[in-house]
């Protein structure tokens, strides 16, 4: 039987909220703290505020019971054995991570430490941050034996966050003290011993069968670097396949076949080899920049990351050029835009390449009518509705009388778009797909001029290897 531990989670954004309800799911008592009263009120009322699969069910299951929501960090600190910091670490103007939210939380925690606490840094932070948190807490008068600081980076993806948290590829705990490492080991023991998978009341749609999750204990500095290096490596993989897709376009080869062919090598693996319009989101762009900046500050040459960023920016420009090549001139063209979120199955538009492309197209004088299954309300804050920027509540509404249709986000539902409806609705049957959602042969047979990423326009894709 696993031990129930009192946990505070500071921050109720994507990571904080998912961690809070999942810790409750693992049997712990959780206090989730946010300094935004509006968020706390919404969460108490059962509103997750974000579009994330399984989160509403988990909030309904544990909200106001296993997880209580509050703005009172003092009380949460007093009650909890472990306090997880999960506030934002956005990119500053210089590319560094802005750690001011982390520092503010650490100082406030320090003012309320009255017994031994494990302070767990879950936000993504550069190496040495744990050491700074320790110093800040000591400077606020807390003696060294009253606390430990641990790094426990989070690897969940938006859209599959709950599943990722409960079925992690690995759990990383960077702890320089055995006492603190033991507390983290106990917190995650339902996953690392696999007891959760045997006893859980199933969440519909989430598997309850799994092997115990591996847990890796490291130094705090190694854990901090593991998080940045993981995201940077994935960004390298995406930029690599984007560069390869450009070569495929030049050589009239098919990047999907190439991707499959290289991904079957178990040393490379098939994931994160989908070309597109460049990576976005609240993590990769800022974490690659922060990692590059840390390396620079430490005098380490990591120009590879500068090149990754350059390729990523180029990928959007190449897509814009593709739109131009299909339409000749852009000014005055009415374009249907499918997808505004930075990827499918989320309403998050932070650093969304789709939003960047809309801005570029508006700058070229296009008129846009956009549809996204979940991100429209958020998008309206970035791209306010106007005569030039309109929003539709369906694919059909966006496509009506448009000169072409652009696919900018890989929402699964776009795969089953009714092509006959599109033919009837669009002014010209032109589809420019930044996410390779459709089969070029099917599109060509359905009478579309179809441009995608790294695949021949006319030649039907021939599978080299059958799955
Ligand atoms: N979003 C992801 O998928 C993801 C995945 C892994 C790691 N991360 C990392 O986790 C961290 C959090 O990311 P996020 O996307 O959840 O951020 P977010 O911006 O969605 O949420 C941060 C929350 O912290 C709250 N907050 C800020 N200052 C506070 C304070 N002083 N006291 C209490 N609450 C405070 C904010 O109100 C907000 O609700 C970042 O470092 C991010 O890089 C994010
Ligand atoms: O083959 C691929 C895979 C992804 N992407 C793009 O890459 C971006 C990031 O995608 P993804 O990694 O799925 O989303 P995030 O939710 O941002 O998750 C990443 O960032 C999180 C925050 O650090 C980490 O926890 C996760 O492990 C890491 O995958 C998106 O724009 C995707 O469209 C591609 O272009 N091609």
Image: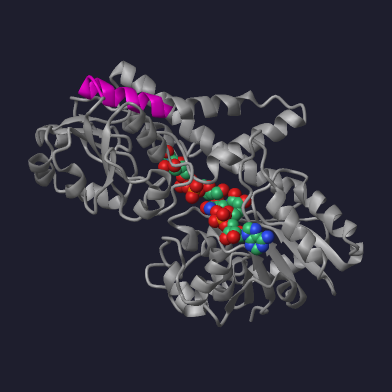
- Identify the residue shown where x is 34% and y is 22%: 248
Foreground residue, 426 or 18? 426
Foreground residue, 2 or 436? 436
Q: Where on the picture, by quarter, is residue 360?
A: top left
- Identify the residue shown where x is 84% and y is 65%: 147
Considering the image in quadrants, where does the N terminus appear?
bottom right
Considering the image in quadrants, where does the C terminus appear?
top left
Q: Is residue 134 visible?
A: yes
Q: Can residue 136 be found in the magenta stretch?
A: no
| Residue 452: image location, x then y, percent | 28, 31
- Identify the residue shown where x is 28% and y is 19%: 252
Magenta stretch secondary structure, dominant: helix
Q: Where on the picture, by quarter, is residue 358?
A: top left
Q: Can residue 326 be found in the magenta stretch?
A: yes
Q: In this picture, is 462 found above or below 105?
A: above
Point out the quarter of the image occupied by ligand 1: bottom right
Q: Which residues are magenta?
A: 315-330
| Residue 356: image location, x then y, percent | 41, 36
Q: Is residue 275 visible?
A: no
Q: Residue furthest top?
A: 251
| Residue 151: image location, x then y, percent | 72, 55
- Identify the residue shown where x is 52% and y is 78%: 62
Q: Left or right: where does residue 85 sit relative to residue 145?
A: left
Q: Where on the picture, by quarter, is residue 448?
A: top left
């Amino acid at each position: 039987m696993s031990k129930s531990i009192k946990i505070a989670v500071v921050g109720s954004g994507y990571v904080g909220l998912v961690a809070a309800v999942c810790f409750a799911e693992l049997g712990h008592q959780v206090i989730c703290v946010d300094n935004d009263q509006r968020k706390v009120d919404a969460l108490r009322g059962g509103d997750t505020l974000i579009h994330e699969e399984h989160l509403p069910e988990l909030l309904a299951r544990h909200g106001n019971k296993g997880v209580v929501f509050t703005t009172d960090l003092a009380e949460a600190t007093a009650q909890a054995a472990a306090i997880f910091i999960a506030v934002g670490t956005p990119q500053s103007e210089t590319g560094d991570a802005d750690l001011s939210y982390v520092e503010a939380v650490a100082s406030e925690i320090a003012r309320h430490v009255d017994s031994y606490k494990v302070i767990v840094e879950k936000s993504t932070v550069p190496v040495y941050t744990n050491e700074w948190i320790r110093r800040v807490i000591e400077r606020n008068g807390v003696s060294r034996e009253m606390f430990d600081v641990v790094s426990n980076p989070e690897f969940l993806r938006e859209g599959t966050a709950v599943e990722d948290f409960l079925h992690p590829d690995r759990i990383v705990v960077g702890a320089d003290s055995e006492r603190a490492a033991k507390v983290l080991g106990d917190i995650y023991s339902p996953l690392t011993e696999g007891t959760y998978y045997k006893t859980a009341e199933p969440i519909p749609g989430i598997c309850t069968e799994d092997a115990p999750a591996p847990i890796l204990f490291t130094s705090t500095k190694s854990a901090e670097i593991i998080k940045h290096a993981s995201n940077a490596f994935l960004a390298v993989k995406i930029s690599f396949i984007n560069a390869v897709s450009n070569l495929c376009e030049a050589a009239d080869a098919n990047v999907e076949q190439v991707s499959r062919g290289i991904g079957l090598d178990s040393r490379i693996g098939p994931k994160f080899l989908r070309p597109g319009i460049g990576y976005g989101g609240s993590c990769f762009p800022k974490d690659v920049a922060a990692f590059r900046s840390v390396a620079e500050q430490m005098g380490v040459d990591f120009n590879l990351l500068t090149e990754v960023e350059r390729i990523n920016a180029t990928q959007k420009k190449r897509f814009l050029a593709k739109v131009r090549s299909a339409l000749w001139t852009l000014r005055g063209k009415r374009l249907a835009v499918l997808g505004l979120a930075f990827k499918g199955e989320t309403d998050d538009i932070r650093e969304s390449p789709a939003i960047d492309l809309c801005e570029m197209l508006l700058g070229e004088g296009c008129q846009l009518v956009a549809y996204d299954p979940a991100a429209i309300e958020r998008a309206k804050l970035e791209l306010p509705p106007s005569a030039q920027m309109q929003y539709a509540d369906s694919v059909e509404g966006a496509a009506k009388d448009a000169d072409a249709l652009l696919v900018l986000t890989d929402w699964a539902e776009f795969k089953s778009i009714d092509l006959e409806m599109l033919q009837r609705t669009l002014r010209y049957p032109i589809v420019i797909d930044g996410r390779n959602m459709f089969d070029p042969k099917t599109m060509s047979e359905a009478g579309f001029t179809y441009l995608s990423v790294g695949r021949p326009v006319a030649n039907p894709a021939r599978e080299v290897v059958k799955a």
